[in-house]
Structures are given as structure tokens and as C-alpha cells.
Image (cartoon, grey):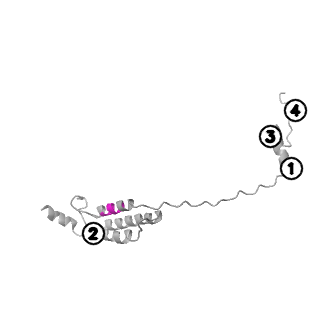
Amino acid sequence: MVTDVLTRFVDGCLAEELDDRIAREVFTSLPANPSREAWERAKVQLQDLYHTYRRRNPCQASAFAALHRCIYQVYCEAYDRLDAMPVKPTQKRQRKQIAPPPAAPVTHQQVLTQLQSLITGSPIGRVVDDEPFE
């Protein structure tokens, strides 16, 4: 009785087809020690395949994981397999060293202005009180 009901629920399940397609399209093109970019592309491809099959899977037994291996279990197994793969560390790109711009030529007037400003606290041209406490 239970098997008859389960058989009706799993009729047309696409789990095996998804499993074959993941093996063919995701894992065969991936080297044993992939680069970070190739590994990330494989994860995106796996998720694309899962969601494509999830939309069109007629199976109604996905809630019975103990009795039936459905597309979600196939997806989780493949995801765990990808997650366990050793991934080559990404190479840090060398930043291009930019030389600082050349210093602008300093005029005699600029030097005097800076000195007076440092000494008196007032720029050139401003009248400085000789007796600041009046």
C-alpha cells in the first residue's frame, strides 16, 4: 500500500537525469584542483541546473527523503562534493606602483610666506601688532 502511493508520488522524478547531467556538465569539465574562478563557475552552473530541474520536476515525494532520493538530495550531494574540492589559492595581483608627481617648483615668495606664517601666525601682507596685549 505505502509503496503504491510512493510509486505514484515519484512517477516521472527527474533525479537520475539531474544526477547524470551534473556529472556530465559540472564535474567532467572541472579539473581535480580547479582555480577559484572555475570552482565558482561550477557552483553557479550546479545551482542553475538544480533550479531548472526544480521548476519542471513532477515528483511529489521530495518530502520523503528517507524513502526517496529526489533532486534536492542530488543537488546537496553535488554541492558537498564541490565544497570538499581543494581549490587553488587566488594569486594576488601586483599593484602597479605609481610614482608620486614631481614636486612643483617653489618660489622665493612662497618660502617667505610660509616662514612668516609659521613664525608670526599671520600671512605676509597682514599687519602684525607689535604689542599684542593692549
Q: Position of residue 12 (x, y in %)?
A: 24, 70
Q: Quadrant of the C terminus?
A: top right
Q: Position of residue 118 (x, y in %)?
A: 80, 40
For the residues marked 4 and 3, what is the alpha-carbon distance in whole angstroms?
Answer: 17 Å
Q: Amino acid at mark 2?
A: Glu
Q: Amino acid at mark 3?
A: Leu
- Disc 2: CA contacts within 10 A as few (<14), some (14-19) or many (>=20): few
The circle drawn on residue 108 is 1
Q: Position of residue 68 (x, y in %)?
A: 22, 62
**Residue receiving disc 2:** 16
Query: Could you tell which of marks 4 and 3 lies nearer the N-terminus?
Result: 3
Query: Could you tell which of marks 2 and 4 lies nearer the N-terminus?
Result: 2
Disc 2 on helix, strand or loop?
A: helix
* Quarter of the image where one finds residue 63: bottom left
**Residue receiving disc 4:** 130
Q: Amino acid at mark 1?
A: His
For the residues marked 2 and 4, what is the alpha-carbon distance in whole angstroms?
Answer: 96 Å
Query: Could you tell which of marks 4 and 1 lies nearer the N-terminus?
Result: 1
Asked whether 17 falls inside the magenta stretch, the response is no
Disc 3 on helix, strand or loop?
A: helix
Q: Is residue 25 visible?
A: yes
Q: Relative to residue 93, is residue 65 drawn left or right?
A: left
Q: Which residues are magenta?
A: 74-79
Query: Could you tell which of marks 2 and 1 lies nearer the N-terminus?
Result: 2
User: What's the residue at 39%, 59% (across, down)?
Assistant: 83
